[in-house]
Amino acid sequence: MTVPGLKRRQEAACRAVPRLIEPDRDASWAAVADHPLTGLFSSAPWARAVAGTYGFTISAAVQEGADGATSALLFSHVSDLRGDRIVCGPFCDYCDPLLDDSAAWEDLVAPLMALGIPITLRCLRNTIPAQDRRFSFAGRAAWHGIHLARPEAELWQGLDGSARQNVRKAQRLGVTVREGRSLEDVRTFFDMHCHVRKTKYRLLPQPFALFEALHANFAPEDRLCVMLAECNGAVVAGILFLIWRDTLYYKFNASTDRQTCPNDLLVWEGIRFGQRRGLMRFDFGASDYVQPGLLRYKRKFATEESEILRLRWQPPGYADPRAEQAGFALSRMTQLLTEPGVPDVITRAAGEAFYAQFC
């Protein structure tokens, strides 16, 4: 089977070799970095940010031809409280294998399976892994995108009527949006992000080190933008965008005021920003089906909808009671440390100490 519309890659004299990659210096990697399925989550700056924050080693099983890697499967071998496992793209919304056919998939996944520990991956556009009956479906998430290569008037008319109404309401109530690129702007967003994760979702926040690493890896080339919505002198909402290739990625969002509809205005300004930059797509990322409100919100803007599949393989008869116990303990700890009475500094410190365990 082949991925529709993708050119079949060279297979002769290729072999799968699991090896470490160096995103900045690996000349062989440059060849596969232009694969049609590459995106933010298989990019060098994203890999550096995640690896540097959480201490993961980003590796790859690759097929190599005369001009370098022709196909690749990115992965990390994680060993922590939850046991040993292979995660193909830790903390990624999705990370499609960079390959065109089932033969390449067989070659690349074989050395990972030979390690004898569970493997998980999330695929959006590459359907080949889902056809492998050795892998089971472990979860699904919705994905939404917006085509940006249209005149602004057409983009505006393409919004759902309620979205246009909310944008006008926010503007009428005095909400303004500014584009930030400094680390101070990132910190402002992060403070709000932490508050929302704790109070609304009862989740630990990612460590600020991740946001520092994203800024360090994306901002110097103008690939990071924090849009902050302000009303009456206060920041009430924000979106952290990352840019890779021809796509604007809606990576993190937070808001403390819904009455003035700042989120609708932020997304509209993000759409305008991407169109002005000459980008082709706005990537809304993953949305859990258990959050119908989030799905409705993104559908007001989206021009395309698809599904991210979470796939899992484990050796026959495999069991790891340690991993199950640790998962339960982490869940209980999260509940306790996001209680309203727990000081925010404690919740943030817990995120810094334990967030890596959740991949």
Image (spheres, helix red, strand yellow):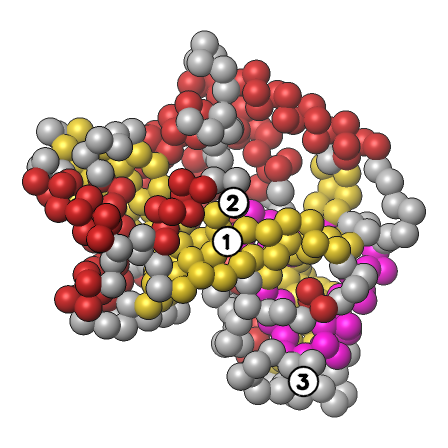
The amino acid beneath tag 3 is Gly
Whether 111 is among the magenta residues is yes
Left or right, 334 with reference to 116: left
Q: Residue at x 25, y 63 (%)?
A: 158
In primary-sequence order, the first of circles 3 and 1 is 3
Residue, disc 3: 65
Residue, disc 2: 288
Q: Report which quarter residue 126 is drawn in.
A: bottom right
Instruction: Point out the frontmost of discs 3 and 1.
Output: 1
The range drawn in magenta is: 86-115
Dot 3 lies on which element? strand
The amino acid beneath tag 1 is Ala
In this rendering, does residue 42 appear at all? yes
In this rendering, does residue 27 appear at all? no
- Relative depth, front residue between 52 and 36: 36
Residue, disc 1: 142
Q: Report which quarter residue 200 is drawn in.
A: top left
Instruction: Point out the frontmost of discs 3 and 2.
Output: 2
In primary-sequence order, the first of circles 1 and 2 is 1
Left or right, 98 with reference to 195: right
- Relative depth, front residue between 136 and 234: 136
Q: CA distance from mark 1 to mark 2?
A: 6 Å
Whether 74 is among the magenta residues is no
Image: 240 above or below 235: below
